[in-house]
């Protein structure tokens, strides 16, 4: 039974965390906050008591009031404007909606001397520029962020460390790698591909073409259901002030994912590269190591890529006309 | 002749930069902005045209308006709440008054496509925890910030790098080591010691006691007049997107500085340690390397410690009753 605050409640990670909590921690009380309204029905969770407040963490007085009255024992801090591409267009917005919202939250917990465990979610983007020989990336690897979003996440992690070590707040940090899974918005690469492919398969058109960025890059994709299981274990057994990679440990070429999805859908497509989608300073290959979280918490990814992709396809089949 | 915006105009570094500019760049136009009112008389600079605006860089619309109308060719970004100790008491204030004010400024220059060279001042605090065998610290040394202030400065530097490399802004960064010199506020260690010692020497009391923190720590102190000369050269010849240490390359034990000052004043004192002034995670020894700025710009420190200390004494002798 947990008394849990979830920031970024309207996002798909939150949704999957609730699925897990509903099974693992019946009787839990959840306060969700987000500046967007969730598009899933959270009254369906029979084993949970859930309330939602539509507020922005940048509005300190409003969020302080709500959090103070709830008195969480755990905080899952998912709130983030998490698009790298967007951060190049609106860097200020990206920074304040990652670093400053976290700092506001941490400050409130510090000032109120609240006893609660905070999970500060970070990103594999923090590693930035990496050479192939340095893979897989461990938590010790130096951080060289190369986008406004990545800098915001590094600052959040460094602040987390200060609040944990210097102010004795019970904060644990993650560097979470690329998520995949049903429910993810189509601004993220796999979800975007899948939505396009499902539409093509429904339309049964002859010229199947999708536009993409650089398909030769290799990324470490981890299923969101494995991710939320890691977060749950970190709440239970993680060590304060420590950072943990959450990743699959596998590198997959983007073009192989498209191939796999077309096989599952029984269609053929041609890909066309859109130069607008090529990022200026993109790593060819990024793979993480989950050795630390495996050694300390016994976590490892369980969901195979095939399962993830078929569930994502199923999700978009219910959404796309 | 420079058209220069100085943020943090009311501070003592600004004052010394104006001294240099008045000699080296007659005819220059300066716009100073600060949320505090300067306590020096800036109408005394015969060779400069100086205006001042009392605004806070967190007030984006006000500062945007003023900077847009001035159209600077150079920006010396000195504005900072630069006390490590204070940052442990008001971490949020420290963060926004370092990182966010810089980000607001950089955003404005980016959005307006202004052609100007920005000097983003950072701190040796960014290095954080260092081992003695790693000294002297070069610019390549990894950053492990251990205070809220230090995190704010690292975030500022990382953002500077993104704006230089990703948005092609002409930004140069420094990691400036402990400043000393006449005019520095007494919240900084040497200035605080000196003020106390000058007061004792004026009072001619028998029991001369001053309270201090840990006097066995070794720090790299650089005279503010050497610092502003480095900044001037960086404007002229620094490389975009690069970070430069500004330091003396010498380590001095704090207790030797007190000894030196008592000799210069012809007094004897006893020191008493105040546990409140001991920092929890203080490095024993910090020394920087100025090899990079020497190789690239020909800069090296010129003012000897004795000269700095006697000028600081002279300053406090005019101030202390």
Image (tube, coloured by chain):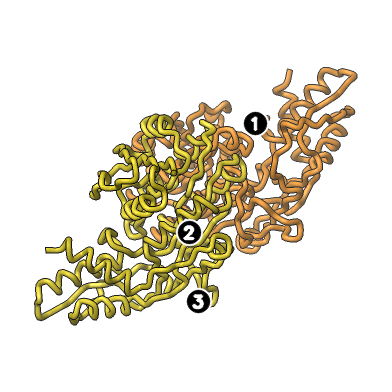
Chain colours: A yellow, B orange
Answer yes or no: is residue A41 visible: yes
**Front one among B186 and A310:** A310
Residue at disc 3, secondary structure: helix
Residue at disc 2, secondary structure: strand
User: Mark 2 or mark 1, which is nearer to you?
Assistant: 2
Q: Mark 1 — residue? A: B185
Instruction: Give the CA separation, mark 3 to mark 2.
Output: 19 Å
- Asked which quadrant contains residue B132, the reply is bottom right
Q: Do the residues labelled 3 and 1 touch (CB within 8 Å)?
A: no
- Please tell me which of labels 3 and 2 falls first in the chain: 3
Marked residue chain, label 2: A
Instruction: Give the CA separation, mark 2 to mark 1.
Output: 41 Å
User: Mark 3 or mark 2, which is nearer to you?
Assistant: 2
- Asked which quadrant contains residue B179, the reply is top right
Q: In this view, does A245 lie above or below B224?
A: below
- Asked which quadrant contains residue B277, the reply is top right
Q: Are marks 3 and 2 in contact (CB under 8 Å)?
A: no
């Amino acid at each position: 039974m947990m008394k849990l605050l979830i920031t970024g409640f309207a996002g798909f990670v939150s949704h999957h965390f609730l699925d897990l909590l509903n099974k693992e921690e019946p009787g839990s009380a959840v306060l969700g906050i987000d500046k967007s309204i969730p598009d899933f029905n959270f009254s369906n969770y029979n084993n949970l008591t859930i309330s939602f407040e539509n507020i922005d963490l940048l509005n300190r007085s409003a969020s302080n009031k709500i959090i103070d009255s709830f008195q969480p024992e755990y905080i899952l801090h998912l709130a983030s404007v998490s698009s790298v591409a967007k951060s190049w267009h609106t860097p200020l917005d990206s920074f304040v909606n990652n670093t400053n919202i976290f700092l506001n939250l941490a400050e409130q917990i510090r000032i109120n001397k609240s006893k609660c465990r905070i999970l500060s979610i970070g990103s594999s983007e923090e590693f930035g520029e990496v050479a192939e020989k340095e893979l897989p990336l461990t938590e010790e690897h130096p951080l060289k962020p190369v986008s406004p979003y990545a800098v915001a996440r590094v600052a959040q992690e460094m602040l987390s460390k200060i609040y944990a070590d210097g102010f004795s707040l019970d904060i644990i940090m993650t560097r979470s790698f690329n998520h995949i899974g049903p429910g993810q918005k189509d601004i993220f690469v796999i979800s975007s591909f899948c939505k396009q492919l499902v539409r093509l398969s429904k339309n049964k058109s002859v010229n199947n073409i999708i536009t993409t960025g650089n398909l030769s890059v290799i990324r470490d994709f981890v299923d969101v259901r494995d991710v939320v299981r890691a977060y749950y274990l970190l709440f239970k057994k993680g060590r304060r002030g420590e950072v943990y990679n959450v990743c699959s440990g596998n590198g997959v070429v983007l073009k192989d994912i498209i191939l796999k999805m077309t096989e599952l859908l029984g269609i053929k497509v041609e890909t066309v590269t859109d130069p607008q989608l090529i990022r200026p300073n993109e790593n060819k290959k990024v793979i993480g190591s989950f050795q630390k979280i495996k050694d300390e918490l016994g976590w490892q990814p369980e969901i195979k890529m095939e399962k993830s992709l078929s569930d994502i396809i199923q999700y978009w089949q219910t959404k796309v006309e």
